């Protein structure tokens, strides 16, 4: 038997299933149609664009922050007005970028004394906080290593106790204004006002020592006829978004920097002279002012000369 067409396969071949098609790699996948940019472009590293742990919103927001000019506002309110995502999702994406080192928030004090938050975008983030850093090269040991310190001996049990590391001294709180007359009533009202601040913001929780230090400053405001609600509003308005690190120092600065002036009637008031009622003189029946009836000045002088 002669085969007429040797190119025809001897048996029918089954259709490949799954991803085993011979042309599957050339038909699918992304194809780049790139054009060289000469103006208005930003270089973004693949470590951000292809990050394995960041969400897609965080990657896009990080790319947007790197493309912004210097000095452009980048707070949550501005970003919420720029993009359709809400404030909650944008705040979560900013926290992701801050966790992985692509974003840094720094607090700065302006010339007027107000504390503002500055957002710093990092295109080459450092080691991620909370994650182990790369192994550094071992440092060469010194030729003359210092002698190890002997542990101190406790006199009670004779056990070796290592020396405790020196604690970093706490910085003193700034001074606050003082009232002219610090009575117990006004100081108690100031203490109650400071204790109620944590109801408006949990970050303003104060200790008893900090409250005693700040109470005279609040009493100075109350002494100048500022209502307690206005004092509370001045202390809790425009708080930093990332929270207050030292609430006592923050409140002490506001009590000093925003102290209102004294009321006008107290600053320039002078003691008024006492006006006595008009009396009739018992000697000459002439009218004069005195607290009680009697003789006028002339009649009293004449009466003393006659005596």
Image (cartoon, grey):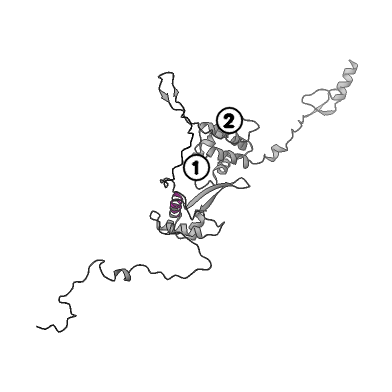
Return the x and y of residue 123 as percentages of the image width and height: 49, 56
Residue nearest the observer in this picture, 224 or 303: 224
10 Å neighbourhood of mark 2: few (<14), some, or many (≥20)?
few
Q: Position of residue 202 (x, y in %)?
A: 47, 41
Q: Is residue 276 magenta?
A: no
Depth order, front residue of 197/96: 96
The residue beneath circle 1 is 200
Query: Which mark's residue is nearer the viewer, 2 or 1?
Result: 1
Instruction: Name the residue furthest left.
Output: 1
Give me the disc on residue 230: none
Question: What residue is rendered at 60% in x and 33% in y?
Answer: 216
Is 37 located above or below residue 283 in the figure?
Answer: below
Highlighted magenta segment, given as a residue range: 90-99
Q: Earlier in the sequence, mark 2 or mark 1?
A: 2
Task: Say if the magenta span includes residue 98.
Answer: yes
Q: Is residue 81 visible?
A: no
Q: Quadrant of the N terminus?
A: bottom left
Q: Disc 2 marks which residue? A: 185
Distance in Å between CA atoms under marks 2 and 1: 24 Å
- Judge by depth and name the residue closer to the eye, 211 or 192: 211
Residue 203 percent across, percent down from the top left: 49, 41
Q: From what the image shows, is residue 240 above or below residue 299?
A: below
The residue under the point 58% across, 41% down is 231
Chief secondary structure of the magenta span? helix
Q: Quadrant of residue 210?
A: top right
122, above or below 164, in the image: below
- Mark 1 lies on a secondary structure that is helix
Q: Is residue 183 visible?
A: yes
């Amino acid at each position: 038997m002669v085969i007429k067409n040797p190119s025809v396969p001897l048996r029918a071949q089954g259709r490949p299933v799954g991803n085993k098609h011979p042309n599957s790699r050339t038909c699918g996948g992304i194809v780049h149609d790139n054009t060289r940019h000469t103006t208005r472009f930003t270089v973004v590293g693949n470590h951000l664009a292809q990050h394995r742990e960041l969400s897609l919103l965080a990657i896009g927001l990080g790319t947007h922050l790197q493309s912004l000019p210097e000095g452009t506002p980048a707070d949550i309110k501005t970003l919420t007005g720029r993009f359709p995502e809400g404030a909650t999702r944008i705040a979560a994406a900013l926290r992701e970028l801050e966790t992985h080192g692509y974003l840094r928030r720094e607090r700065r004090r302006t010339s007027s004394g107000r504390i503002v938050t500055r957002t710093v975008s990092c295109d080459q983030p450092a080691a991620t906080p909370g994650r182990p850093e790369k192994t550094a090269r071992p440092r060469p040991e010194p030729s003359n290593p210092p002698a190890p310190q002997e542990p101190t001996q406790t006199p009670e049990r004779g056990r070796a106790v290592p020396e405790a590391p020196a604690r970093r001294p706490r910085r003193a709180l700034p001074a606050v204004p003082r009232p002219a007359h610090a009575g117990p009533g006004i100081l108690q009202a100031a203490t109650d006002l400071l204790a109620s601040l944590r109801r408006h913001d949990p970050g303003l929780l104060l200790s008893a020592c900090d409250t005693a230090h700040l109470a005279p400053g609040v009493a100075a405001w109350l002494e100048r006829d500022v209502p307690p609600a206005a004092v509370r509003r001045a202390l809790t308005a425009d708080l930093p978004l990332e929270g207050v690190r030292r609430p006592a120092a923050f409140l002490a600065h506001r009590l000093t920097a925003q102290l209102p002036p004294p009321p006008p009637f107290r600053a320039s008031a002078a003691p008024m002279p006492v006006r006595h009622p008009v009396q009739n003189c018992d000697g000459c029946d002439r009218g004069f002012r005195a607290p009680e009836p009697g003789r006028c000045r002339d009649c009293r002088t004449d009466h003393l000369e006659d005596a």
